[in-house]
Image: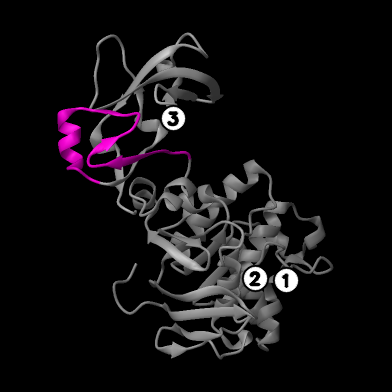
Amino acid sequence: MSDTTPILRINALTKTFNEFTALHAIDLKVHDGEFLAIVGPSGSGKTTLIRLLVGMDEPSDGSIWLRDQRIDEMPANKRPTCMVFQSLALFPHMTVGQNIEFPLKLRKVAPEDRKARALELLDLLRLPQDYYSKRIDQCSGGERQRVALARALAFDPEILFFDEPLSALDYRLRKALEKELKDLHARTGKTFIYITHSLEEAMVMSDRIAIMRAGRFEQIAPAEEIYARPVSRFVAEFMGEVNLFPIRAGQAEGVTLSPAAASAFGGATGTLMVRPESLQFLEGEEHAELTFAGRIEAEYMLGSRVQYTVTLEGGQTLIAEVLRENAMPGGPGTPVRLGCAAAACHLIAEA
């Protein structure tokens, strides 16, 4: 990614619908060649944002800049960007080649140049060149996704926007296409802005994730940073299963802190976050910097891992995940002690 002027810049972007404010004066900078995923629950504003970015709606206030050009008042068909929709919006009565060439035909590109570009894109999307004459309604779901991507790339847009393009696919195909999209991004060097409700998709593919909540960005950072160091309880919970303990003056209810751990948190006040995979079962008199005691309530097999729900002595519920070879014998009702290192925890300093 470039450290120079951002390819896309949003300044105080606001969108209201009558009395309802869908976006609250948000700011965002996207780097040239970046893969940014925008994630959030239903109603968080991500669809409203993407509609403003591609020109399907107009903002109520604020501005959108593509490099040094303001584009929020520019018609969608004049912007050097393209959108890949969930529905794909392909023409079923046309061939693959005709679908890919469609935006070029609208721009009055010569037929021979259109075909050359379509064949080039079939190669890029790893589709056989004889698919050029194949009808869309004869293509599989994965092949249609590739054709939609080829069409989006046909006129060499500066930014590709994606509106949950994989959400209607089955799990295996979705996982395969996640990897293909990440690979395509690397091979083209294009800027991708990807809207999704799937945190897993965002973490697999993107350089950074922007978490939206109620029309605002809650946190924008690489996936690893957001997962390990969320800025709020909302982000911590949104990024997967998590254990959260209020901590006051360096003490957390339900948690026994070693002197070193108590010192590490330094009398802090906030919320202590412990991810389930950071915990391990303790044997005998074994201790850890953070120790939890309770009884197993439930046990779930998750392939290579086992997840446990543990009720702590103070009544709180704890979730722990361990590799199958480290599973706890005994099942529900078994008294257990679990521990983790202070370095594996994160203090959320919000009130």
Q: Residue, x 71% and y 60% (percent of image)?
A: 130
Say which residue label 3 marks.
316
Q: Amino acid at mark 1?
A: Asn
Mark 1–mark 3 distance (CA, rounded to whole Å): 56 Å
Q: Quadrant of residue 322?
A: top left
- Highlighted range, magenta: 241-268
Q: Position of residue 137 (x, y in %)?
A: 81, 59
- Looking at the rendered structure, the secondary structure element under dot 3 is loop
Whether residue 187 is visible here, answered yes or no, is yes
- How busy is the neighbourhood of tag 2: few (under 14 within 10 Å), some, or many (20 plus)? many
Contact, mark 2 vs mark 3 (Cβ under 8 Å): no
Q: Quadrant of residue 31?
A: bottom left
Q: Is residue 4 left or right of residue 175?
A: left
Q: Residue, x 27% and y 47% (percent of image)?
A: 269
- Location of residue 95 with respect to 182 vertically, above or below: below
Q: Position of residue 180 (x, y in %)?
A: 54, 53
User: Residue 99 has which mark?
Assistant: 1
Say which residue label 2 marks.
151
